[in-house]
Amino acid sequence: MKIRIGTRGSQLALWQANTVKNLLEAQGFESELVIIQTFGDQQIQKPLHQLGTQGIFTKALDDALLGNQIDIAVHSCKDIPGEIHEDLMISSVLKREEPQDVLLSLDDTIHLENQSQKFVIGTSSVRRVAFIKHYFHQHIIKDIRGNLDTRIEKLESGEYDALILAYAGIKRMGLEKYIKQKLSKEVFVPAVGQGAVAIMIRKNDDYHYEKTQKINHEQTFYEISCERAYLKAIQGGCQLPVFGFAKIFMDSIRLLAGVASVDGKVIIKQELTDIVQNAQQIGINLGNKILNEGGKELIYVSKN
């Protein structure tokens, strides 16, 4: 029986789903792709933060899983909200690509630290907007939606001077020639799960759990578990710029995470390090720490 793999229809989503398909088939498990359109794919004219719902790129796939239309769902891990349906679980993740953000442009002179010019920078991420406003407020931010090809077309047409996107998607789509600057993960801290591909299954589905465990990357799984525990603790479904990046070094795992105000005036950022086995507890502890150091107030303001 073929494993039915649910995926969005974008080029990047199909690259991710085909990677999972190839890895499963290398283990001897036949599979096929099932393309499902999500709410986020349908609402391409509105900025993401105005859509006002969690899981805009994942809920349709969750529903297909719960309705037994598919056996597994493949997601960009950063799209998965902190709270997922009680009958679903992330069973495995692929080896993570470099999670940092990158600046794309056609002009070699464009650099965020260039104080002599104002650049029109395209992004749909409230996290990136907050960082730009905080560190490089001289630049002009303009919302951008669409798949990677569409965004590159808008860059080439002169609608934007630069774009800020995740390196992982740029690399996977072979668009590295546009990269003018790789942004520091200590400054532009990545979104939770950025660079990782996650596989969702139904809870208690031992058959598909066993199959997907064969392609799980253990280090990435620990890192993602740490980040997602933080996201859940910080109530990461809100439309606030939330960020978190965990990295394993030897037997330790370090989490750098925080939250910012939408206008970029306030950035709360902290870090914790502990043994790898305590990955989820680190996320919970740091989430509570951030909430107690001003995060609660930011979340209250964003909701009211």
Image (cartoon, helix red, strand yellow):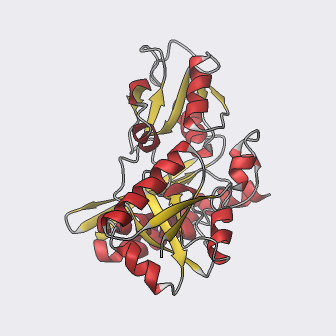
137 sits left or right of 199 in the view: right
Residue located at (39% from left, 38% from top): 171
Asked if residue 241 is positioned above or below residue 273 in the image, the reply reads above
35 sits left or right of 198 in the view: right
Quick check: can you spot residue 87? yes
22 sits left or right of 47 in the view: left
Asked if residue 248 is positioned above or below residue 213 in the image, the reply reads above
Residue located at (58% from left, 45% from top): 10
Question: Residue 264: x, y in percent?
Answer: 61, 41
Q: Quadrant of the C terminus?
A: bottom right
Quick check: can you spot residue 120? no
Question: Residue 284: x, y in percent?
Answer: 48, 73
Which image quadrant for residue 172? top left
Which image quadrant for residue 69? bottom right
Looking at the image, the residue that sits furthest to the right is: 304
Q: For this rendering, which residue is in front, 28 or 114?
A: 28
